[in-house]
Image: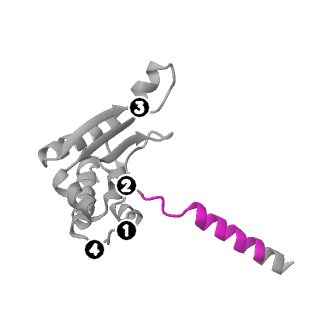
Amino acid sequence: MNKIILKLTTVFLIICSILLADNGLITVKSSHSVEATADSLENIFLRKGLTVFNRINHAENARIVDKKLRPTVLIIFGNPAIGTPLMQNSQSIAIDLPQKALIWEDEDGQVWLTYNDPKYLAKRHAIPVENEFIQKVIKALNNFASMATGS
């Protein structure tokens, strides 16, 4: 009986570790509304000289087709001075550029800012994490997220 319980526990732990595996996303809690967090983030990008390619309000788009969606905004942004050297290093990273930031509200009303983990992208595209441009992106996104969310 104890062996069966031990085996079941082991299987359960393996399944849990697979389900909780790194999904390549960084999510930061915001102390502001979706709209305020998105506005703040977009203004930070513009002040820092990044290009904001688009801002997509998924909840508004859902309303157009008579569907409900909690507040959900996607900002597409980039900086060719950083992205170009990354693409020169591994052209496949272009599939993940320009970058995206998702600002969303969960079922409890908590607002979150989510973006792709640069370390995950580096691994995905065989770029050393120590790469100077990956390191710049890590530092910049961490700072931008902290400023926009008030964390």
| Pointer 3 or 2: first along the chain | 3
**Cβ–Cβ under 8 Å for marks 3 and 2:** no
Q: Quadrant of the N terminus?
A: bottom right
Secondary structure beneath dot 3 equals: helix
Q: Mark 4 points at which residue?
A: 130
Q: Position of residue 95 (x, y in %)?
A: 36, 51
Secondary structure beneath dot 2 equals: strand
Asked if the stretch drawn in magenta spans residue 6, the answer is no
Q: Which amino acid does label 1 sit on?
A: Ala
Alpha-carbon distance for marks 1 and 3?
Answer: 32 Å
| Pointer 2 or 1: first along the chain | 2
| Pointer 4 or 3: first along the chain | 3
Q: Which of marks 4 and 3 is in front?
A: 4
Q: Mark 2 points at which residue?
A: 116
Please name the residue shown 35% across and 39% down the image.
Answer: 74
Q: What are the residue bounds of the magenta stretch? A: 7-24
Of residue 18 and residue 142, the one placed in the foreground of this image is: 18
Q: Position of residue 8 (x, y in %)?
A: 76, 71
Q: As displayed, is residue 10 above or below residue 73?
A: below
Q: Which amino acid does label 4 sit on?
A: Glu
Main structural element of the magenta stretch: helix, strand or loop? helix
